[in-house]
Amino acid sequence: MNILIALLGLAVVFGLAFIVSSNKKAIRYRPLAVMIVLQLLLAFLLLNTVFGNFLILGISETFNTLLEYAAEGVNFVFGGLLVAEGASVFFLNVLLPIVFISALIGILQYTRILPLFINVVGLVLSKINGMGKLESYNAAASVILGQSEVFISIKKQIGLLPKERLYTLCAAAMSTVSMSIVGAYMTLIPPQYVVTAIALNVFGGFIIASIINPYKVSPEEDILEMPDEEKEKEEKQSFFEMLGEYIIDGFKVAIIVAAMLIGFIALIAMLNGIFAAIFGISFQTMLGYVFSPLAFVMGVPWSDAVTAGGIMAIKLMTNEFAAMLNLKTLIDAGTLSDRTIGIVSVFLVSFANFSSIGIIAGAVKGLNEKQGNVVARFGLKLLYGATLVSMLSAIIVGLFI
């Protein structure tokens, strides 16, 4: 039964992507088939093998250790705050460790370890996806640097790109997540689904983009090199200048996420109250009914479909953290099946939400105003595609839970 539902889900995802394709005749099906097979192999490897369990356990323990180190710095600054016994402060325990992780990323970037890793992964991806080296580099870099910072590393090329290639770059940025916040995700949802989602979304982004936005890149167009300005900056910037910059950037991310959560969760609470008073049903439950068919075709049992649909809707309308907090409450309460937890968790691990349209368009506009306006115009189509990427990854995972 799960296989039949998965096939239905794949048909729905690919059908929704095909409907909005800009050039249906240009779709190349062989790379798509290869990448889908790779998604299936990766999901099986990570979730159903001893090696996969060992790998995920190692990654999880690494991040847990890093969070413990981060706690030393957080406790030094905020250790005097009185917190009720057994209580946990989300900002201190989940968000502020982002500062430390960001600093580590800066060190790896400064020592050229990350650029080497990104280039190698990008080269491998370019051999698989049938797209350009720039798109492949960007997908690998997005996982490390995040959806806005990644465009700085390719800012010389942005002004030269046609809208088709620009769409693919932005889709990759919205479909992946920044490594600096992976540790925070792992405190809210099971780590194995965080790792699996990151791996699947890289290929999923290319699969959906290849259907929605098919094109071919000539060797002359496929330029990948670091801008001269960036090279000069790296040569001039000292280690401690770089470290301070990444620490401040990490703190900005923590503050921004905290501010968005305060605003969005308060708005959802208000809407829940208004809808309950007028219609006798909360806003979140209403959204759950709207999104329940999508949850069902992703493989969520029908008994959990409305609840899962509500969490999916919160992610789309606000951000993944707000949705993960809702999911964690239900996980702690034991009200959801393991299958539902896994499928919904994978769906949540991406930046596919309305606020990301503004973030990505703003990041590109800061580097090239004309191209930023282009991104803003296809913003809804970008979100549409990134949401299909999340659905595709969730469907694939559902086959192995």
Image (cartoon, helix red, strand yellow):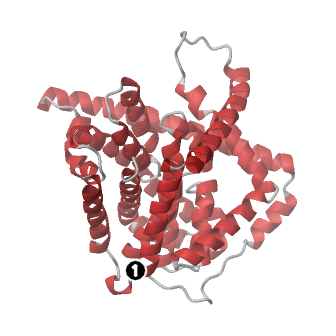
Please state which of residues 310 and 36 is positioned toward the viewer in this rendering. Answer: 36
User: Who's the residue at 63% across and 55% down the image?
Assistant: 144
- Few, some or many C-alpha atoms within 10 Å of disc 1 (few <14, some 14-19, many ≥20)? few
- Measured as percent of width and height from the top left, residue 152 is found at 65, 63
Q: Is residue 321 above or below residue 176?
A: above
User: Who's the residue at 47% across and 52% down the image?
Assistant: 351
**Is 335 left or right of 352, judged from the image as shown?**
left
**Is 131 left or right of 357, judged from the image as shown?**
right
Q: Name the residue carrying label 1.
A: 29
- Measured as percent of width and height from the top left, residue 13 is found at 31, 64
**Is 221 left or right of 326, judged from the image as shown?**
right
Please state which of residues 328 and 382 is positioned toward the viewer in this rendering. Answer: 328
SS category of the residue bearing label 1: helix
Residue furthest left in the image: 279
Residue furthest front in the image: 50
Q: How many marks?
A: 1
User: Who's the residue at 72% across and 41% down the image?
Assistant: 247
Please state which of residues 254 and 104 is positioned toward the viewer in this rendering. Answer: 104
User: Who's the residue at 37% across and 53% down the image?
Assistant: 399
Three-letter code, disc 1: Tyr
Q: Is residue 364 above or below residue 57?
A: below
- Measured as percent of width and height from the top left, residue 8 is found at 25, 61
Q: Quadrant of residue 344?
A: top left
Q: Is residue 291 above or below residue 18?
A: above
- Measured as percent of width and height from the top left, residue 334 is found at 35, 26
